[in-house]
């Protein structure tokens, strides 16, 4: 199978903006501000398995972190209309994530892949898992028979996901990751050295003290707050479900190349 060529930083930035992975994204400002407010009000659905206590009860403080680390409009008076993700922040986070992947490959680490956004990001995770396996890292195989949130927790193409009724589910829940980590511990298996994930899968892993990298949209503030607190290693800002999952191919090519894991022709 052929994939997108490795883009330069400039061409990747242009691609991210053109496909609305970054730049003027589809998620409206109203949705972003609603999620920031709900997180600040203590709605755990938006905590992604992290424990914030009373540290982020100010919606404007959440907004400041999101402006700094994701690139949303910083003006608190901007409450409706267009919002943004800064492509330079996306690429910078990809570089930091690449360093974690390179460390995993060099150290023969155990890496767990998981996604709550299979419709958008499954192939990104799959390709990174395959590249790490080829480079000598160990991709964690999850225990069988796991369940969470009225569904099964299964692994397809080396990536853990939630399945219900023969359908892969979009989920923010931390429960599937909790099921995996609890089962590994119960079986006496070592926990992952690195978790490469998104949503509550990444948040719960980070809360458990594991090194975690997570993709996060501009309406998902929890992972960025966790990164600001040094709980999560890297939060990668991007629209996590654009109109065509192939739009993520240049991003994946850049990430693997930056990590020294790009397939050799």
Image (cartoon, rainbow, N blue to C red):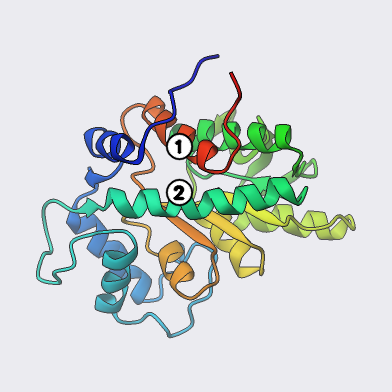
| 133 or 171, nearer to the observer | 133
Extreme residue toward the top, this view: 1
Q: Quadrant of residue 93?
A: bottom left
Rendered image: mark on residue 94: 2
Cα distance in 3D space between marks 2 and 1: 8 Å
Q: Residues within 10 Å of mark 1 (few under 14, many from 20)?
A: many
Left or right? Give the position of 254 relative to 183: left
Instruction: Specify whether residue 237 is in view.
Output: no
Is residue 116 visible to the viewer in this orientation of the structure? Answer: yes
Percent x, y for residue 143? Answer: 80, 44
Percent of width and height locating residue 225? 42, 70
The picture places residue 110, in percent across and down from the top left corner, at 75, 49
Residue on which disc 1 sits: 254
- Residue at (59, 49) in percent of width and height: 196
Do the residues bearing badges 2 and 1 touch, measured as CB atoms within 8 Å?
Answer: yes
Number of numbered discs: 2
User: Furthest residue to the right?
Assistant: 188
- Image check: 261 left or right of 191? left
């Amino acid at each position: 199978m052929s994939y997108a060529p490795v883009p330069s930083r400039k061409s990747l930035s242009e691609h991210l903006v053109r496909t609305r992975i970054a730049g003027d994204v589809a998620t409206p400002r109203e949705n972003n501000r609603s999620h920031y407010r709900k997180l600040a009000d203590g709605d755990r659905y938006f905590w992604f398995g992290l424990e914030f206590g009373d540290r982020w009860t100010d919606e404007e403080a959440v907004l400041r972190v999101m402006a700094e680390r994701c690139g949303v409009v910083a003006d608190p008076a901007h409450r409706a209309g267009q919002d943004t993700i800064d492509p330079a922040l996306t690429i910078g986070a990809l570089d930091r994530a690449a360093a974690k992947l390179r460390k995993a490959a060099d150290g023969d680490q155990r890496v767990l892949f998981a996604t709550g956004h299979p419709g958008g990001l499954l192939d990104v995770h799959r390709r990174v898992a395959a590249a790490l396996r080829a480079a000598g890292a160990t991709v964690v195989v999850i225990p069988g028979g796991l369940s969470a949130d009225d569904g099964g927790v299964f692994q397809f193409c080396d990536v853990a996901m939630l399945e219900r009724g023969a359908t892969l589910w979009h989920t923010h829940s931390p429960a599937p990751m909790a099921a995996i980590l609890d089962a590994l511990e119960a079986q006496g298996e070592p926990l992952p050295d690195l978790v490469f994930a998104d949503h509550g899968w990444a948040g719960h892993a980070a809360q458990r003290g594991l090194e975690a990298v997570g993709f996060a949209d501009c309406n998902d503030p929890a992972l960025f707050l966790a990164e600001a607190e040094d709980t999560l290693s890297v939060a990668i800002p991007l629209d996590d479900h654009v109109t065509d999952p192939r739009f993520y191919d240049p991003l994946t090519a850049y990430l693997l190349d930056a990590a020294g894991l790009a397939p050799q022709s």
